Image: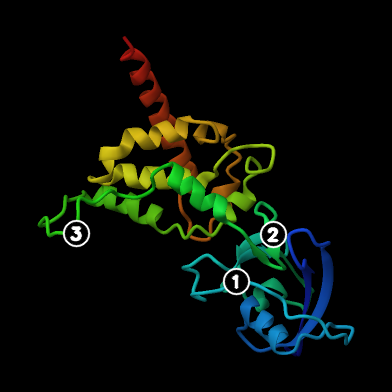
Amino acid sequence: MPPTTVNLRIKRQDGPNAAARWEDFKVPYSKGMNIIMCLMEIQRNPVTAQGQKTTPVIWEAVCLEQVCGSCSMVINGKPQQACASLVDKLSPSGETITLEPMGTFPIVRDLVVDRQQMFDALKKVNAWIEIDGTHDLGPGPRQSPEVQEVTYALSRCMTCGVCLEACPNVNDRSPFMGPAAVSQVRLFNLHPSGKMHKAERLDALNDIGGVNDCNNSQNCVRACPKGIPLTESLAAMKRDTTVHGLLGFLQLP
């Protein structure tokens, strides 16, 4: 017989300086439900499994189709998107599902964290393409199918933070910016217009917290929900920053 309820154990915290606590919930089961649906049930009826009234669990969600990355959290010990996490796969025999906020980022409340460090890293590496006004410049530069195939995979990054959560080198003892920003440097350096600022991006990756602080654990590529070849990007950027650094040294007067 299919289960009638879903058992959830959720790590909660009322604010950045508040003490963390665990609360248990039981929500009605429905076929095909995901973790977001479970959280919405708790929001409608914020009562613990012990029958005590509590506050609704706070979480983030926007697109509900694994595009925005905002619903990232740690589910059964693994960082992933709540919208794509199905109860039937997480708890095939009615096991309790645990939900926690990602520990790499500062906590805001409950399952919500502040991923600002990811956006700061994108600013540091100039992860955009400069445009000269908005007037029509005619057809843009062309890319080969081979390059398009690579850049499409890299462009799927949704800044969800899962790769940083999985990376042992991203912590409060290391300045490493994480694999997402490094991979975005590869993306924009491959773009015909983005190449104009290639040197600036490589300089940023050669700086403190750049690609050289990666110790090649390869957790990121296994955790990435979009299947982005992050280890390939890390290897490519280590090579490019090394060549860039050597050429700069040889050009010194």
Relative vertical location of residue 162 with respect to residue 68 in this rendering, above or below: above
Reading the image, the residue beneath label 1 is 60
Nearest to the eye among marks 2 and 3: give it. 3
Q: Secondary structure at mark 3?
A: loop
Query: In the image, what residue type sits under mark 2?
Result: Ile
Reading the image, the residue beneath label 3 is 134
Marks 2 and 1, Cα distance to the nearest angstrom?
Answer: 12 Å
Task: Tell me where residue 30 appears, x and y as whole percent.
Answer: 66, 89
- Report which quarter residue 42 is drawn in: bottom right
- Residue 107 is marked as 2
Relative vertical location of residue 153 with respect to residue 58 in this rendering, above or below: above
Q: Secondary structure at mark 1?
A: loop
Q: Quadrant of the C terminus?
A: top left
Nearest to the eye among marks 3 and 1: give it. 3
Query: In the image, what residue type sits under mark 3?
Result: Thr
> Which of 28 and 68 lies nearest the eye of the viewer?
68
Numbered marks: total: 3
Q: Secondary structure at mark 2?
A: strand
